[in-house]
Every structure is written in structure tokens, then in C-alpha cells.
Amino acid sequence: MPMEAGLTVDGKTVARIIAKNLENLKYIDHDAVIACLLEKQVIDHTDHVDISEKSQKEKVLFLQKILPLKGDSAFQKFLECLEASDHKKLAETMRQAPRCRLTFLPDETWVNGVYVRRAFYHSSKATLPHPP
């Protein structure tokens, strides 16, 4: 499945998504994904040569380190590489993660009849109720 046009994710969000899915990333075809990242110019030839002989654990750490630093479109290309190497379910799980964001409420915000003063996660489709 191709990526949504215009999906870009900042480095902090990429790092958070990768950390959340670290266990699943241990079981991907690292060589295929890294070769795909080279083909899509997310990494360069030197990166590819440096990582190709490393262990699977080191390859996961490489992805965790390098992807947040490679710009907004690197995450999209990474997900495309996961899909191309038959990891479609993981790609879809990771694709859905940016749709949640941290929202800071003002000091005097009504939510379900109660004042709240904290951050909470919500879907981009969620709406806050109006104060009474």
C-alpha cells in the first residue's frame, strides 16, 4: 500500500515510533530494508557498507539512530521499505502512530464537566467538548 501523500514526521516522533516498535523491528528482514533505504537514498553507500556486516541487534540500533536524523520523508520511505519486504502489518502499525499527538490544555479547560490541567494523548479526529 503506498504512503499517504504529504505524510511527514519530525525526528522526535520518528524516534518515539521506532522505540515503541523496537521489539517488532528485531524480526524484520534488516538486509532487505537497509538495501531499500539505500535505493531510496535515505542512507548513502558508506552507511550501507558500514552496517551490512553488523549483527541484527546493531542493524536495529542503526535504524533507531539514523532514521530520526534523515529528514521528514525518511520515515515515509522506511515504511515503504517495510512494505516492500513483506512487513505490511508493521508498516501500517507504525503509519498510524503519527496520527496521535500530545495536546496541552489551557489552565481552565472543561472536559466532561471537570477542569483539567494536564497533557493527554488523543486522536487527531477527537474533539474537545465545549464548556457548559
Image (cartoon, helix red, strand yellow):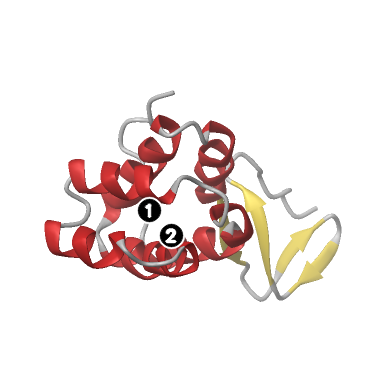
Dividing the image into 4 quarters, which one contains the N terminus?
top left
Pick the front one: 57 or 132: 57
SS label for mark 2? helix
Pick the front one: 23 or 103: 23
Q: Quadrant of residue 44?
A: bottom left
Q: Which residue is mark 2?
A: 14
Q: Are marks 1 and 2 in contact (CB under 8 Å)?
A: yes
Decide: few, some or many residues near mark 2? Use Cα within 10 Å; few <14, some 14-19, many ≥20: many
Three-letter amino acid code at the position of disc 2: Val
Q: Quadrant of residue 80?
A: top left
Three-letter amino acid code at the position of disc 1: Val
Given this view, does label 1 or label 2 mark the residue nearer the observer?
Answer: 2
The residue at 30%/37% (across/down) is: 6
Query: Compared to 83, does 111 lie above or below?
Result: below
Residue 75 located left or right of residue 113:
left
The residue at 13%/57% (across/down) is: 45
SS label for mark 1? loop
Q: Position of residue 48 (x, y in %)?
A: 22, 58
The residue at 37%/71% (across/down) is: 65
Q: Quadrant of residue 92?
A: top right
Q: Which residue is mark 1?
A: 9
